[in-house]
Every structure is written in structure tokens, then in C-alpha cells.
Image: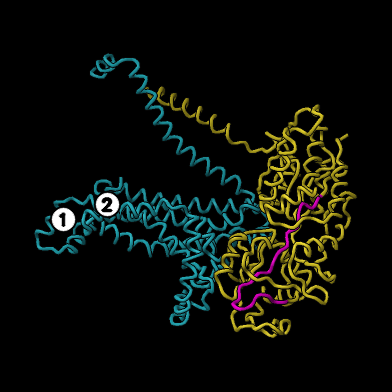
Amino acid sequence: MTTNALTSKSSTSGRAGDKIFSGAALAAGVLILVTLFAVAVFLLIQALPTFFADPAKVSGGQGFFAYIWPIVIGTIIAAAIALLVATPIGIGVALFISHFAPRKVAGPLGYLIDLLAAIPSVIYGAWGYMVLAPALVPGYEWLAQYLGFIPIFEGPASQTGKTMLTAGIVLAVMVLPIITSLSREIFLQTPKLHEEAALALGATRWEMITTAVIPFARPGIISAVMLGLGRALGETMAVALVLSTGNLIPSLIKTGNQTIAAEIALNFPEAFGLRLSELIAAGLVLFLITLLVNMIARGIIARHKEFSGAN
Amino acid sequence: MKLNRLGSAAAVLSVAAIALTACGSDSPTATSSESTSSSAASGVTGTLTGIGASSQTSAMEAWITGFKAANSGANVQYSPDGSGAGREAFLAGGAQFAGSDASLKPEEATKAKEVCGPDGAFNIPAYVSPIAIAFNLDGVDEINMDADTIAKVFKKEITKWNDDAIAKQNPDADLPDTAITVVHRNDESGTTENFVEYLKAAAADVWTYDVSGDWPSDIQSENAKGTSGVVSTTTSTNGAITYADFSAVGNLSTVNVKVGDDYTKISAEAAAKALDTATPVEGAAENDLALELQRDTTEAGTYPIVLVSYHIYCSTYKDQATVDLVKAFGNYVVSDEGQKTAQESAGNAPISTSIAEKATKAIDSITVAQ
């Protein structure tokens, strides 16, 4: 009955505003799902001819699966290198900002890290192949000479430095701001009481972090890394510019390997007919991988809702 | 209440959907095919739509600017979707002309009769691009190579700059013991296609791969995206060699290619000469200027590694206005002025006068469909 009393008091214009707002909010929510669905349907319809095509006509001549799996592996390798490099650095920077740096330094440093996320990927790509790649050549030669017995460092090293490892490092720089800013926000939300309790029990600052901050932030860190992984998987231009593409090979310091996003970017402009359909099918595969990653990330965040500061 | 909320959501959504669909139209014909009346005595009017090679973009921009300046009522839209996509759209009736790094294939020419009438479509060379074999080697500015050597270098059979095969042809050069780093395009491109076509024709024994716009995947070597990518990678790597549009090689040194008994240095003139020695494609229609380049020519002073970019037109169009528009644009492109504008802005080589004359004659033969 109270609701009746309330509605009768509020003016008609207010109710209309309420309705429009709730309608708009619902529409926005539905629109996201519709967009996602429409993209999936578009990819599926456009990709269909590839799955029914004569395997001999698909690039490589052995059917779509033989065409796609090396670049799926390549995509995963690139993303894995990026995360292996960026996760420890990102968490380190975030901890420094949240718990070690004096307040005067912490603020500007946080802004600077966030600024990294605003640089267009084509700039990262250009920097990667013009500056970073040539600079890494001596390092790769050293790796090939002394650690060449490990398959991933098998020589002879690339003379241009345009390798999977370089691409992975560029990607690491690109995902760094995502991991850093999300982790930083979570570290800052650690209950002060936990931290002070740890310190009061005689813990050093490092012990306080490992006993109070990290356990609290773990799910948040995982979801930050997952979001970074999403970016690394889908990154197109930087990889297309940096990597000397080729067949799938284990060595990370030789020419070779390819990622899905770069494969699409490089071949799309001149593609038509079946080739276009193949590339869209590759896009569909990437879409599914990214969807999976994001769903896992969301799942982790949702499961730890009550602790995590990420939502 | 629930129903009401859904209803208003649906209302907002449908408005958004209408707004969105209004922006995105798939069919290029939607905006293009209508041409206004041909009553205007001076100049042509209407909009011409072309789809095709992205490599023609900068030349096309120059042509469109020049053409619009001369014909205030006319407009040309060019969508750089790629050569293959352009030919496909043209054959489906989605564009009035196509820009392509390759002429129509025989089966495409047959298909063209459905859209263009019994005489089909024809190819007109729009410009020539010499493809340089560019390298970066400390202390060496010029190097001579024959076709077999070039093929072996790019196949990675010759791996050192002081290899006997190279040294023999360059007795005066002081060749270092540097490893050769081959850099190729990693995106599909007409430059790659024409370069490997040359290797296949002139060094058939060595180069056994199929001709395609993609680099043969059996040869694992360094690569980069686009002309600017290969040039930049080569410039920053000592001992690197690549192939790229001559206008874009910058400070890199270029290889002189053996033709007949001499080595030809790359130049716009030598490239235009390759066009003159070319013969019409076998079985081509009377007005078709699709050329079979003599990649293995022995005529001195010819530079055989060139890319000919074509415009593809129908022999008939449905109304007089479109015919006038196509003729005006086609003739502008092959005219002295058109060729000069393109050369200035895109850096490609003009077609020779004899080809231009033939092109004008072909374009003038376009008529209204019966």
C-alpha cells in the first residue's frame, strides 16, 4: 500500500522520467547482448563456406583445421610471453604505488602507467619494429649462441629482431597498464585493519603484503591478468608490424609463427571469396577464445564478489 | 509493469536500430548507379563508383581531384577494397569500373559479358610501377645480378654477399662476408605477385613456386607489413635485401637486373619500355589492352620487373550519361595531365604515349547498351 501512496504523490512527469530511464537502461543492457549475438551470427554466416569448402582449396591445401591450428598456437604463445613478462612487473608496480611509494610519487606514477593504455597500438608496433627489434638483435645472438640447445632459443637468430619474443615483449608493454591499474585498485582496498594487525604482530612490510594484501587481492589479480590476456590475444596491429611471420616453429628468436589477429589484418585488405571467408572463420575462432577468457575472468570475479574490489 | 518496461526498451532499441541501419549500406550500387540527366552540354555530371586495388589509392585521389576540377558536376568514388574484391564487385554489377593490379582472368572475362553486354569488359593500363630490388649493404651502392642469382638469393640458396655467383657479376665491387637477410611482404600484395611472376618467367629452373600475391610459405625468411614495412626493416638491417615499389625505396641501393647482355638500372623510362615490348594477352578482345609482359625479354634498356595497374571498364553501359561519365574519367586518367598528376602524387611511372593512344581509342568505343 505504501507504494500506492508514493506513486500518487509523485508527479506524472517524474514517473515518465522514471520509465524512460529504466527503459533506456534496459535497452542499453539488451543492446550489448544483441550486438554480441549479431557479431557472432555475422562471423558464423560469413565463415560457413570455409567449413564446407573443398579442403584442397583452403589456404595450405589441407582444410581449415590444418590452416588454423598453427596460428591458434602462435596466438597463445604471444599472449603467454606477454603475460609472463607483464604480470610480475605489473604487480610489482602496483604494489610499489599502493604500499611503498611516498604519496607524492604514487599519484603521478599511476597516471603515467594509465597513460600507457592510451597509446594507439600502431605506435607500439612502429616502436617495436623500428627501435626495439634492432636493439634486441645482439641479445638474441647471445641467446642463440649460449642457450641454443633449448628449443625456444634455437639459432640462427633473426638479423632484424622481428621475432615472436619481440612481439611478446611489445604486447607485454601494452597489457602492463591493464594489470597495473586493476591490481593497484585492489591492493588499495585491502582492509586497513588486516594490514595493521599484521604489522602489530611484528610482520615486516613484505610479510604484511604476503599475509594480508596478496591473499585478499588474489582473485582480483587473476581477473586483471585475464583481462590483460584478452587484450594480448586480440591485439592486431602491433603484432602485424613487429612479427616476421612464418610457419609455426618452436624457436622464439627466429623468423616464424603467426597470430590470428595479425593474420587477419595482413590478408584482409586484398582478400575475397573463399579467402575472405577463411579469415572471418579465423576471426570466429579468436572470438570464441576471447569470449572464453572473458567468461572465465568474469566467473572468477563473481565467485569472489565479497572480497574483491574489482567490481 | 514488466510489459511496459519491455515495451519502452523495445521502442528505444528500434529507434537505435533504424539510426544504425541508415548509416551502413552494404551495396555500393545504392549511392552510385543513378546518373543525372545528360542535358548539361558542357562537362559531365553524376557519380562514378570504382572499387579495387588499395595500391591505386594515392594515384586515384590525384585523379579524382583533377577530374572534379575539370568537371564540376561529376564525382568519382573509389573504394580501395583490394584488386580481387574490386573485380568481384565489378562483375556483380556493384561498381562501374574496377582498379586492379592484374587484368581480368579468362573466366572473369567470360562472366563480364553478363554485366557488360556481348562485348564484355576490357582492361586499360592506368600506370606502371617499377619494382626495385633494394638492399642495404655497408660500402656497396650498386650491384649487378641476373635472374637466376636473384631467384637463388630470394630462395635463400645464396646466403652470403660474397658468394661466387654474385662476385662473378660484380668484379669491381668489394663484397663483404655478410649474411644475406631476405625481407619479403607478409601481407598479400600485387608487388609480390609481379615480382615472383618475373622470377618464375626469367628463372624458371630455380623458382619453382606458384605465382601468387602471397610469398611462398616454403621459404621461411624475414618479412614486414606493407611497402613501408619492408623498406624500413631493410634500412635498419645490414645485409638485408627486399623488393618494393621504386618510389618508396628511399636511401636503399638497388640491384641492376641483367636483361640481354647488359645490366639495366631501374628507372621510370626503362619500366615504361617494358610495357612497349609487352604483347596483348592471347585471345583478348579488340579493345582489351591487357598486356602479357615479356619478363624474360632480352631487349637492352628494359627493366622487366614492373607492376601494371589496370582500370577495368564495361564495353557498354545502360545510359548515355554513364557512358559520358566513364569516357570522360577514363580519358582523363590516360591523358598526359592525368598521368603527370598521378606521377607527382603517387610516384609511379606513366604509361607510354603509344599505349595511351590505344587506351583513348578503346575508351572512346564505349557505347550505350542496345
Q: From the rendered image, report the letter of the chain displayed in yellow.
A: B
Q: Secondary structure at mark 1?
A: helix
Residue B75 on image: x %, y %: 71, 37
Bounds of the magenta span? B123-144
In the image, which is nearer the foreground, mark 2 or mark 1? 2
What predominant SS class does the magenta segment belong to? strand
Residue at image mark 2: A107
Q: In the figure, residue B295 lies in which quadrant? A: bottom right
Q: From the rendered image, report the letter of the chain displayed in cyan.
A: A
Q: Chain of mark 1?
A: A
The first of marks 2 and 1 along the sequence is 2
- Give the Cα separation between the discs numbered 2 and 1: 21 Å
Q: Residue at x 25, y 55 (%)?
A: A106
Which amino acid type corresponds to the residue marked 1 in the rendered image? Glu
Image quadrant for the C terminus of chain B?
top right
Residue at image mark 1: A195
Which amino acid type corresponds to the residue marked 2 in the rendered image? Gly
| Residue A219 visible in this rendered orientation of the protein | no
